[in-house]
Amino acid sequence: MKISNNDKTLDLSEPQIMGILNVTPDSFSDGGKFNQQDAAVKQALQLIDDGATIIDIGGESTRPGAALVSLDEELKRVIPVIKAIRQVSNVWISIDTSKAEVMKQAVAAGADLINDVRALSEEGALEVAVKADVPVCIMHMQGQPKNMQDNPNYVDVIDEVCEFLDTRITECINAGIKRENIILDPGFGFGKTMEHNFRLVNKFSQFLKFELPLLAGLSRKSMFDHLLGLKVDERLASSLTGALLCAQQGAHILRVHDVKETSHMLQVMQAANTY
Ligand code: 9MG
């Protein structure tokens, strides 16, 4: 399994680490615009050094209850950072957005991959993704970030996530997206209770049936708080365990905050699979 963009290919025969780079005003607290940009580039280089092969850049939080950000503001946050990272590194850059215009400008600025938690459902997104002809991650979400955790409800979470992904794959392909450009994500924490999330971890291997790359994003999510009563900065061990369980079941990309620790975890897993 692999993903490609022009002359660039990412081999997915071993799990790859997608490092999270949030560029919201509180991410890099000190200084003005230029200091923040420098800090974002420095952070990206650190993530690469720690083992990330993809940097996921987002300018709008998708956390439960998070406020929406205007198009102008989102562009102002992410585009200069993408350009600056592209000047110093050939790393895979992923743009975490649901807005068509942000996707378009991000790809023009050097992004290689579109990561959309709304699975290209916003106006114009599908069309931009077709034209951009880059890999796209389509994720399952029940509801919207502002209300998705109010009352998540499924008869069978695995069946319903599979059904959604199956339908969305067909819709994307019918719109002109190449099948080999699609990455799937069950959307841990997006309109799911703790039980739904752990069921998705338990049955993660069922998503292999699509024969497409699978992305797992569990890093520091509230499912670990609900299970163990942990604050965000106490969720490293639980996040690594969740990522390991998905990697062992065939996850191709792990979206994480703690890149170095995830890299160590994967090296241990690979050694145990080798010797
Ligand atoms: C942006 N974002 C936050 N959580 C995510 C997850 O679990 N998957 C993907 N693809 N993106 C996410």
Image (cartoon, helix red, strand yellow):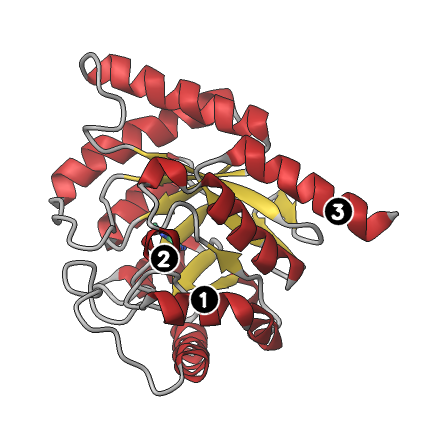
- Vertical side of 155 occupied by 31: above or below: above
Asked if disc 3 and disc 2 are in contact, CB closer than 8 Å, the reply is no
Pointer 3 residue: 270
Q: Quadrant of the N terminus?
A: bottom right
Asked if disc 1 and disc 3 are in contact, CB closer than 8 Å, the reply is no
Name the residue located 44 percent from the left edge and 80 percent from the top edge: 170
10 Å crowding of disc 2: few (<14), some (14-19), many (20+): many
Instruction: Give how far across and how far down residue 228 sits, in percent.
Output: 38, 52
Instruction: Give how far across and how far down residue 28 sits, in percent.
Output: 27, 22
Quarter where residue 169 is shown: bottom left
Pointer 1 residue: 198
Q: Which amino acid type corresponds to the residue marked 2 in the rendered image?
A: Met
Q: Earlier in the sequence, mark 1 or mark 2?
A: 1
Query: Distance of mark 1 from mark 2, alpha carbons?
Result: 8 Å
Q: Earlier in the sequence, mark 1 or mark 3?
A: 1
Pointer 2 residue: 223
Residue, far bottom: 155
Q: Which amino acid type corresponds to the residue marked 3 in the rendered image?
A: Gln
- Vertical side of 44 occupied by 20: above or below: below
Q: Within 8 Å: ligand 1 and the Cβ of disc 1?
A: no
Which element type, helix, strand or loop, lies under badge 2? Answer: helix
Q: Nearer the viewer, mark 3 or mark 2?
A: 2
Asked if disc 1 and disc 2 are in contact, CB closer than 8 Å, the reply is yes
Quarter where residue 119 is shown: bottom left
Q: Which amino acid type corresponds to the residue marked 1 in the rendered image?
A: Phe
Name the residue located 29 percent from the left edge and 42 percent from the top edge: 105
Left or right of residue 13, residue 205 in this image: left
Instruction: Give how far across and how far down residue 191 sits, in percent.
Output: 28, 67
Instruction: Give how far across and how far down residue 203 sits, in percent.
Output: 55, 73
Q: Nearer the viewer, residue 77 or 224?
A: 224
